[in-house]
Amino acid sequence: LDAGPRAPRTPGFAGGALPGPAARRYVARGAVIEDAITGLTWQATVDATRRSLADAEAHCSALVLEGHDDFRVPSRLELVTLLASTRSPTIDPIFEGTLAEYHWTRSLHPLRDTSASTVYFGAAEIVFALARDPSAVVRCVRGGGGEGAGPVREADGRVIDRGSGLRWEVLADRRSHADASAGCEALGLRLPTLDELASLVDDTRSAPAIDLAMLGGEAGPTWSSSAAQSAGERVGLDLSIGPSVRLREDELAWARCVGEAP
C-alpha cells in the first residue's frame, strides 16, 4: 500500500481552549465548512461509501468543491479536532447528516504501516483499521496553519503547547475518574477533553505514543473528561499506542491535567 507520506505531528486545537461561542468557530460556505480556529476547510457532506485508505486518498485528491481542488485525507490530529463527545453523532450539528461511522485518517500505525487510525463519530472513539479494507468513510480537508512542534517543556519546568494554548501537568499515580478529577482541581487544572488529550500523541511514536522524556509520567490508559455513550464510563486514550479506550469511572488509570497557558 502506498498511502503517501506518514502524517507528521500537528498541534491540537482543543474544545476547552476555544475562545468565544462555538457558533463563531464554524462557517458554512456552500459545500465546505471553514474552521476559524484550526484554519482547516472541511468537506461539508460525506457520502456513505466505505473505502480503503488508498481509495479514500484518490477520492479526496479528485474532489473539487467551491473552486478548490487540493483536498486530502486528514491526519488523526486534524480529524479529532471535530469531536464533540457530548453529542450524537459526536460532532457539531453544522456538519449535517454526519454518519455514525468510522472515518479515515492518513495517520499510519507507527509500527505497522498496513493500518491507519480511524475516528468513530458514533461514540468518539479512535481505533486502528487495516488500510486495505473498505471499512471507513472519509471527510476530506484542505488548508491549515502548517505543522507545529506540539508541547514543549519550558525553563521553569512547565509543559506548554503554544499551538493549542494549553499547559499540562501529570499526576504521579493511577486513580479513579473522581480522584483524578479532584487531583487536577487541586492543581487549579482539569481533566482534558478527548481531543485535548489526543493532541499529545505523536503519530511517529509507539510504546509509548508520547514523548515521556518531555511530558513525564507514564503511558497507558489515561483519563479524559469526555463521557462515553454508556453511563458510568469515560472515553480515554491508551497513550502506549494511541487509540481510545472505554474506562469505567471506578477503574484506575493515569491522569494528565490541563489548563490555559499563561
Image (cartoon, rainbow, N blue to C red):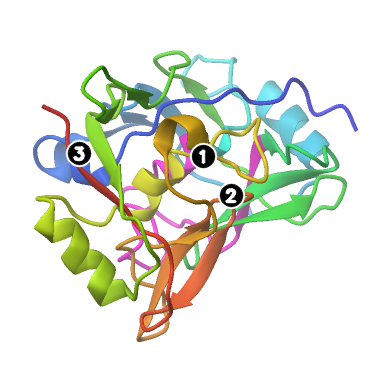
Instruction: Give whichever of 187, 128 is nearer the camera.
Output: 187
Mark 2 residue element: loop
Q: Amino acid at mark 2?
A: Gly
* Alpha carbon distance from label 3 to label 2: 22 Å
Mark 3 residue element: helix
Q: Position of residue 40 (x, y in %)?
A: 41, 25
Q: Position of residue 58 (x, y in %)?
A: 77, 28
Disc 2 packing (10 Å; few <14; some 14–19; many ≥20): many
In front of the other: label 3 or label 2? 2
In front of the other: label 3 or label 1? 1
Residue that carries the numbered disc 3 in the rendered image: 17
Residue that carries the numbered disc 1 in the rendered image: 201
Disc 3 packing (10 Å; few <14; some 14–19; many ≥20): some
Query: Of label 1 and label 2, which has the lower sequence position?
Result: 1
Residue drawn at x 38%, y 33% is 12
Q: In the picture provided, is 255 more to the left or to the right than 140?
A: left
Q: Is label 3 in contact with label 2 (beta carbons under 8 Å)?
A: no
* Alpha carbon distance from label 1 to label 2: 6 Å
Residue that carries the numbered disc 2 in the rendered image: 242
Residue 49 showing in the rendered view: no
Q: In the picture provided, is 108 more to the left or to the right than 105?
A: right
Query: Of label 3 and label 1, which has the lower sequence position?
Result: 3
**Magenta residues: mostly which secondary structure?**
loop
- In the image, which residues are magenta? 77-106
Q: Amino acid at mark 1?
A: Val
Q: Is label 1 in contact with label 2 (beta carbons under 8 Å)?
A: yes
Residue drawn at x 24%, y 30% is 158
Instruction: Give whichever of 112, 239 is nearer the camera.
Output: 239
Q: Position of residue 94 (x, y in %)?
A: 31, 48
Q: In the picture provided, is 132 more to the left or to the right than 21?
A: right
